[in-house]
Amino acid sequence: MTERSSEEQLLEFLYACPVGLLECDMAGEIGMMNPHAMQHLLPLAGPRDAGNLFSALEQHAPELRSIAAAFAPATGRVCDGHRIFVELGCARRTTPRKVLACTMVKLAPDRLMVTLTDISQQVVQEQRLRQADTWFATLLNGINDYAALTVRPDGEVITGDSGFTRQTGYDLAAVIGQKLGDVLKTDTTGGDLRLDEQLVVAERDGWHLQEGWQQRANGERYWCQRLVVARSRDDETGPIGFSVILRDVPRREAAAEDLRRVLTRDHLTGAANRRHFSHAMEREQTRWRDLRHSLSLIMLDLDHFKAINDTYGHPVGDIMLRRVAEACAPLLPPRGVFARLGGEEFAALLPRYDGEQAIGLAEDLRAAIAAIEVETAGTILTLTASFGCATLDEADGSIDALIALADKRLYAAKRGGRNQVFQPQAAAA
């Protein structure tokens, strides 16, 4: 076989390969890329360098650079099927969210082979299976105790069984006629719905299931799965009431919590990752539609951050990014989500925060970032950031419009001098 025929066969394989395939060095500079890889990569690069893998994916998978850099062996599999969630969401999604699976293999000390595969449909099927698994798990998993009640459409308790008193410590006879949501103390700081909110969702979907901390009459907390099922007759347009099942179940194991952190956290900073933020936005958008409570978004972008990477290197830039997450995440309310969306761009999702509250928190975040100091090579480095805030009401319920509005205001803050929070009232004056 001649050298030319070998090259021709290689090119034929690259063009026929049904997945994206590319070769790059450890810095991400691409030496070879097949058409499928181009189809995936070029639309995601935007204004960034499409000839560098890490730069092209910086806004969608910023963790890839640090994952590759952290892999010490001279050869081996760096990551396998690492998921890249391309879109944050939209108000009326008719097609599945695009998700790419990235596998990186280190062939030599400075040579990576990378595959990119579209697994969007697979992810949709996995989500449906997880929903079914959650339903059956409530029937089959270990259980300490359960209670069953019937409530009116407004949440007033009609009937119940002895398990209610045994599980909660409340006298069932004294609870009859009261609103169940007024009796049970549920910890909503983690994002759980109140009972009245759960009834709204169950009326729409037929049922709603959630688990979280609940409080007994003596103040003791326990882990409770609460299933609310709408009850109706064929001739009724709305529910005639709801069945409520309370299950005292063992707390999820630490291993499951560790897995959850791995799946929801940014590899470098520990902030929520893009995938988790996308899911949180869609969940809160649904609650906004059902319950119309306030929902705000803060977008922030570090000022002149590229100069830090170019001057002092990415390791120093990574330290700065970690310090930003460490400074900002503790300032959010319990239900808030602080996430790294890509590169030097972060966001905060704030359920039950109106626009004025979001701007106030953004000012606190701005001051916290401005106070960061990192010493390197005898120099003290500091940071500033620009902020844009928006509410879902302003965006007419559209996630895409919410992101676009907050982003527009962020860049207005940059044009206004940076290191500031855009003030809609001042701009309108």
Image: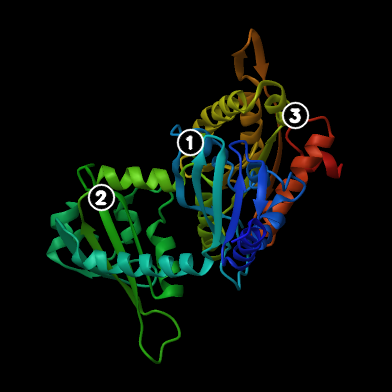
Residue identifier under label 1: 270
Seen from the viewer's position, the closer of residues 53 and 162 is 53
The extreme front residue here reads 1
Residue at 14%, 55% (x, y): give it.
144
Q: Residues within 10 Å of mark 3 (few under 14, many from 20)?
A: few
Observer able to see residue 222:
yes
Q: Horizontal placement of 397 versus 256: left or right?
A: right
Q: CA distance from mark 3 to mark 1?
A: 22 Å
Choose the circle earlier in sequence order: 3 or 1.
1
The residue wearing badge 3 is: 304
Which residue is under mark 2? 223
- In the rendered structure, the answer to whether residue 266 lies left or right of residue 87 reads left
Residue at 12% in and 64% down: 162
- Left or right of 88: which side holds 136? left
The amino acid at mark 2 is: Trp
The crowd level at tag 2 (other Cα within 10 Å; few <14, some 14-19, many 20+) is some
